[in-house]
Amino acid sequence: MPPSAAAAPNPKNTGPKGDAVHYPQDRRQAIWVRFSLLAPACLLVLGIVAAAWTQFLLRGLPHVHVYTPAELYVSHANAGFPA
């Protein structure tokens, strides 16, 4: 087929201004969040963090018992399922 017989390109869609579907003006990604939903969510998270810090400052970290090798091999110290 000779080049002159090929379909002619559409002169209307010659670039970014002519073809808005293939050449959108703004390609940046954006997420819009309502302030009325964001503010309570942030306050909830900050409240939980503040409660955790308050508990830490008043009571400290919980005590975790470290077993000695002698305690690990005593049969009554190894209560498992069924107890």
Image: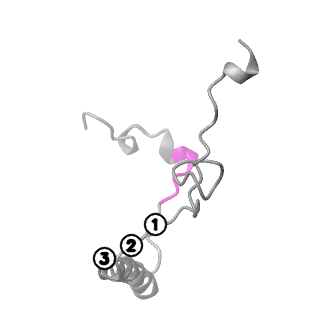
Helix, strand or loop at mark 2? loop
**Residue type at numbered disc 1:** Ile
Helix, strand or loop at mark 3? helix
Please, is residue 5 above or below residue 82 in the view? above
Please, is residue 9 above or below residue 66 in the view? above
Asked whether disc 2 touches disc 1, contact meaning CB atoms under 8 Å apart, the reply is yes
**Residue type at numbered disc 3:** Leu
The residue carrying mark 2 is 33
The residue carrying mark 1 is 31
Helix, strand or loop at mark 1? loop
How far apart, in angstroms, are the residues tagged by discs 3 and 2?
7 Å
How far apart, in angstroms, are the residues tagged by discs 3 and 1?
13 Å
Region in magenta: 65-70
Q: Is residue 6 left or right of residue 25?
A: right
**Residue type at numbered disc 2:** Val
Question: Of circles 3 and 1, which is in front?
Answer: 1
Query: Tag 1 or tag 3, which sits nearer the N-term?
Result: 1
How many other residues sit within 10 Å of disc 1, few (<14), some (14-19) or many (≥20)? few
Can you give x and y, in whole percent of width and height, for residue 56 in the image? 44, 81
Q: Is residue 65 left or right of residue 14?
A: left
Residue 29 in the magenta stretch? The answer is no
How many other residues sit within 10 Å of disc 2, few (<14), some (14-19) or many (≥20)? few
Query: Which residue does the image show at 56% across and 57% down from the upper left?
Result: 24
Asked whether disc 3 touches disc 2, contact meaning CB atoms under 8 Å apart, the reply is yes
The residue carrying mark 3 is 37
Q: Main secondary structure of the magenta part?
A: loop
Query: Which residue does the image show at 62% across and 26% down from the upper left?
Result: 7
